[in-house]
Image (cartoon, grey):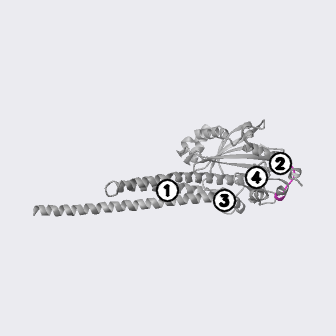
Amino acid sequence: MSFEATAPRVESGAIVALRLFDIAYAIDLAAAERLWAIHASTGSRRSQLSMTPAKAVAFDVPPVLLNLEPIQLLIDGQMLMATVSARLYDFGVVALALRVPVMHLHWTEFSHLLNRIDGQLGPEADASIDAAMQPECWQPLLALVSAVIGPALVRPTPSTMQEDYLLGIVDRWSEPLTAAEVQARLDLVPLLSGERRPLSEGARRDLLRHSYSYFDDDLVVLTWDRAFIYEPRRETDVADVIEVANAQLLELRYYDELLDDELPRMYDLVEAERSTGRFINPLAPRRFADLARRLHTLVAEVTEITEQVDNALQVTEDVYLARIYSAALDQFRVPAVAAAVDRKLAIIRDTYTALYEEASGARGALMEAAIVLLIVFEIVLALMGH
């Protein structure tokens, strides 16, 4: 039996395109809320997981959700309305979301629409649609948000680093379906892969490996850059934790690249200081100490922000959301990037410790030389007086 013949219609659902940007070292969320209330006509609120008890899963610092004016997208010659929101995280990330409501679409049409929005069907598709994932759509939205909340940004960054993610969400089918029936009757692979050509059995198994259900009528399938969510109760908790995992990945990637750039610069500065000669140049110990203090400040800042990122979402009692959140972090390779950041921080810590010790040793050598010179000077004066 083919998937095409047995696939039901999507009576109600949505396609959500996410684009996350790192725009600052931190965001003063309270100030951002005040600024948005003054200068924007749309509302804002602090985010919280909709159906999960606060003691089970909670944001460390609840992000601020800003509502923007809807925009129109031209897809396959049809104008579709998309609602727009921006979620602000205290560690400097903005997550923009475009949500396109979907009603009364056959499953294959739903999958096709998601792929068209993603703009991954080849260059001819990119030329013919105003895809939601294209920068031309995101940059004006980011500029609008940044212009309003600008004073709330702590040390804005010109970083162009970003992450994107795509969600295919179904609330209701044309007939009641369990999670097992959804997997048996629908081909999720074209939606999750974006590929036109059939995938091998091994690739299909890998793509569908991260599938999760709590009740018999809900389903979540995660991949690196897309997810399918079937949630008849219209809860948004799963989508929210996927977004948090993407925000954590983006922030850790930013600091991983920052440290990548810092390490060669650090080596060059240390070598330049050493090349001046510790004993010839009496200012060398002070410059070593100054360089060590600068590296210590960098380590302190990166450690502080990475701890904020690590604690962005605390999962304690909700086993189902904990599994999805953990799977998303693993899929996005967040632990691997975090480990890389920790290794580079350890190198910088060892370097500034060595610099402090070298500066102290150089000061001691200078003091010893000064004492010897004073003794020699006193002996010479004594001999001359005698």
Q: How far apart are marks 4 and 1 (CA)?
A: 39 Å
Name the kind of residue labelled 2 in the image.
Trp
168 displayed left or right of 374: right
Helix, strand or loop for disc 1: helix
306 displayed left or right of 381: right
> Who is closer to the viewer here, 342 or 195?
195
- Count of numbered tags: 4
Figure check: 145 above or below 285: above
Q: How far apart are marks 2 and 3 (CA)?
A: 29 Å
Q: Mark 4, residues whose alpha carbon is within 10 Å: few (<14), some, or many (≥20)?
A: many
Instruction: Please give the name of the residue rendered at 13% of the width and 63% of the height, measured from the top-left corner.
Output: 383
Q: Tell me if label 4 and label 1 are in contact, CB under 8 Å.
A: no
Question: Residue beneath label 1, please?
Answer: 299
Name the kind of residue labelled 3 in the image.
Asp
Q: Is residue 235 visible?
A: no
> Who is closer to the viewer here, 157 or 258?
258
209 displayed left or right of 93: right
Q: Earlier in the sequence, mark 4 or mark 1?
A: 4
Helix, strand or loop for disc 2: helix
- The quadrant holding residue 56 is bottom right
Question: Residue beneath label 4, please?
Answer: 228
Helix, strand or loop for disc 4: strand
Name the kind of residue labelled 4 in the image.
Phe
Instruction: Give the x, y percent position of residue 276.
Output: 36, 53
Instruction: Give the x, y percent position of residue 36.
Output: 61, 41
> Who is closer to the viewer here, 272 or 176?
272
Q: Give the range drawn in magenta.
A: 172-180
Q: Distance between the residues labelled 2 and 1?
A: 50 Å
